[in-house]
Each structure stands twice: as C-alpha cells, then as structure tokens.
Image: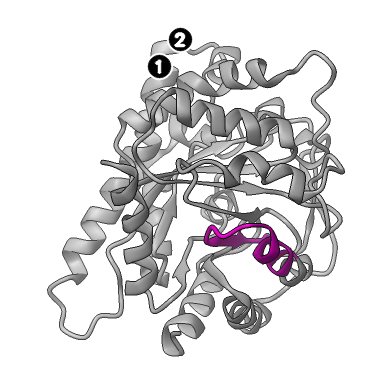
Amino acid sequence: MGMKKATTLLDDLIQNAGGCAVIDGGLATQLEKHGAVFNDSLWSAVCLVKDPDLIKKVHLEYLEAGADILVSSSYQATIPGFLSKGLSAEEGELLLERSVKLAVEARDSFWDSVKSNPGHNYNRALVAASIGSYGAYLADGSEYSGHYGPDVDVDTLKDFHRRRLQILVGASPDLLAFETIPNKLEAQACVELLEEENVQIPSWICFSSVDGENAPSGESFEECLQAINKSDKVNAVGINCTPPHFIEALICKFKELTDKPIVVYPNSGEVWDGRAKKWLPSNCFGDDKFESLSSRWRDLGAKFIGGCCRTTPSTIRAVSKVLKESPH
C-alpha cells in the first residue's frame, strides 16, 4: 500500500461516516464492567493472556454502538512488559499479534452480520493497532508527565518501540495509533521509526495534555508537531486520554498548527493516579454531555472523535448518534 492509498483509506472512512468518523471508547473500563480485574503493570493487556474472548466481546459491543474504528488491546502490551511477567519473547509476540487479530475477527464477524441488512447505519470499521507511549510501559504515570529522565534519548525510544511496531504491522491492522505521547522526543522517535521501517499503512499520533495548552512535558504543541508535519507517514494527529473540557481549545490550537486531520478521544474527566493505579473521583462527563460536545468538536474541525478511559459503549452510541444523524 502506497502512502497515497493509505491517506485515501482514512479519507474514505471520513467521507462514508458523513464527515467525521467515530472511534471506540475505553477498553479496560468495559472489560472491568464484565468482571476483569486490573491492578497490574500490563493493565488491560492482562486479558490478552487470561481472557481473549472477553476482549473480542467488548470490541463487538463498540461496533454495535456505532464505532467506525476499533483500537486494539495492545496499548500496554510490550515485549519487555511480557518478559517481566515471565513470558518468553515469542509468547509476547504472539500476544501482540492476538491483539490485532481479535479486533479484526470482531470487525469481520460484525460486518458479515450487518452488511446484508437493508438500511443499516454502519460502516465497515477499520482496526487501529494501539502503540502506547514509553510511559505507559513504565506504568508510573510518566505518560502524563513526559519526564523520562536524562538517560532516555530518541534512540532509546526507537529501540523500545521497534519490535512491537514490526509485530503489529505484520498482523495486518488497517492503521497504527500511537497514543498518549507526552513529549516532543517520543513524537520524533515515532516519526523516525515509521520512516526507518517504511511503514505503508496509515498512522496517527495522539498526545495527552494535563493543562489543556501544552504536552505533559511542558513543551508546546508547535514544537511537538514539527516532525509530524514534515512526515507523510503520519496521516492524522490529535489528543487522547485528556479531560473533555480541554478538547475544544486543543482542536482550535491544532487547526492552527497542522493541515493533517485532527483526532480527539478524551477520557471521561476522571483523573488517573499512575502510582496507586486507580481513578480519583472528579467531575465526570456523562453521555449526554459527550453527545453535545462531539457535535461541537466536529463543527470545530475534528475528523475522528471517540472516547478513552472511563467511556463506554453507551458513550460511543451517543457520539455516533449525534454525528451520523447530522452529518457534515
């Protein structure tokens, strides 16, 4: 697949979705609702080992809710992370492949069940292989601080991501989703890696933000987007796992800084304590609020909208309803 075709894949989805495509919502949140327990550095990747069928079930729930893009369960799935749990490198690689295959199987079975129904309102979903930041692997909350320490440079980060990227691309997802990138250094590493590996499928790079203005590292998004804007390997850019009340201003900021399509999938507004591995109580945005905000975000120029942590299929159903009933 050439990069022109890769760009067309996302453009076609946006067009088929009426101008703005719907991303799924929180995976771990929904897995927990079904009884999964996470207090582990692997987070939802634990289910890849213990209960892969449950992951597939959640993917299907998001498809039924109207998701146009499924994000795989590989966010916190890394070879070093699996090795630290006593698995072999080969077992870790098979689990990474499984994360994509589960999403593809869910997508294919769902599409087979609805495509012949006249009047259905679904698109054939794309599968995005999730690549969480280095901080997500560290599981110490540094994906929300961007502080990786003086010993981590761009080569460290490329070395960390390279094998996982190769395995995920080899599992044939439709696109790659780099998520919760907290600083310019890791954005640069992701761009260089896509170039070095000559990745031929589309990708997006999404940052987190804790102040609604800058990357968690304190660097401006203008700085963080420099390398991304120069690369034709990155097809969209945006924000994920960030409080919803920051999104409007961030869309406006990104519109000034890039010509690439903008992706937003915020969390519910609750705050994650990375060290205690629990959600702290805070003002949470309900599905009705997400519905009205999604319409606003679309009007401001977002092309992909979904939810991250603590959002559910009912959130995505509300988002899909408002975006597909009043398409642009």
Pointers 1 and 2 in contact (C-beta within 8 Å):
yes
How far across and down, in percent of the image, does residue 86 sit? 54, 11
Q: Is residue 227 magenta?
A: no
Q: Nearer the viewer, residue 295 or 55?
A: 295
Q: Secondary structure at mark 1?
A: helix
Quadrant assignment, res 68: bottom left
How far across and down, in percent of the image, does residue 79 sit? 52, 18
What residue is shown with label 1?
91
Q: Quadrant of the C terminus?
A: bottom left
Q: Is residue 243 left or right of residue 101?
A: right
How far across and down, in percent of the image, does residue 14 sit? 39, 68
What residue is shown with label 2?
88
Quadrant assignment, res 218: top right
Marker disc for residue 19 = none
Quadrant assignment, res 226: top right
Q: Amino acid at mark 1?
A: Glu
Q: Is residue 107 above or below residue 248?
A: above
Q: Is residue 220 left or right of residue 41?
A: right
Q: CA distance from mark 1 to mark 2?
A: 5 Å
Q: Is residue 95 above or below residue 69?
A: above
Crowding at mark 1 (Cα within 10 Å: few <14, some 14-19, many 20+): some
Q: Nearer the viewer, residue 90 or 49?
A: 90
Q: Is residue 265 magenta?
A: yes
Residue at (39% x, 31% y) in the render: 168
Q: Nearer the viewer, residue 13 or 42?
A: 13
Q: Which residues are magenta?
A: 250-266
Crowding at mark 2 (Cα within 10 Å: few <14, some 14-19, many 20+): some
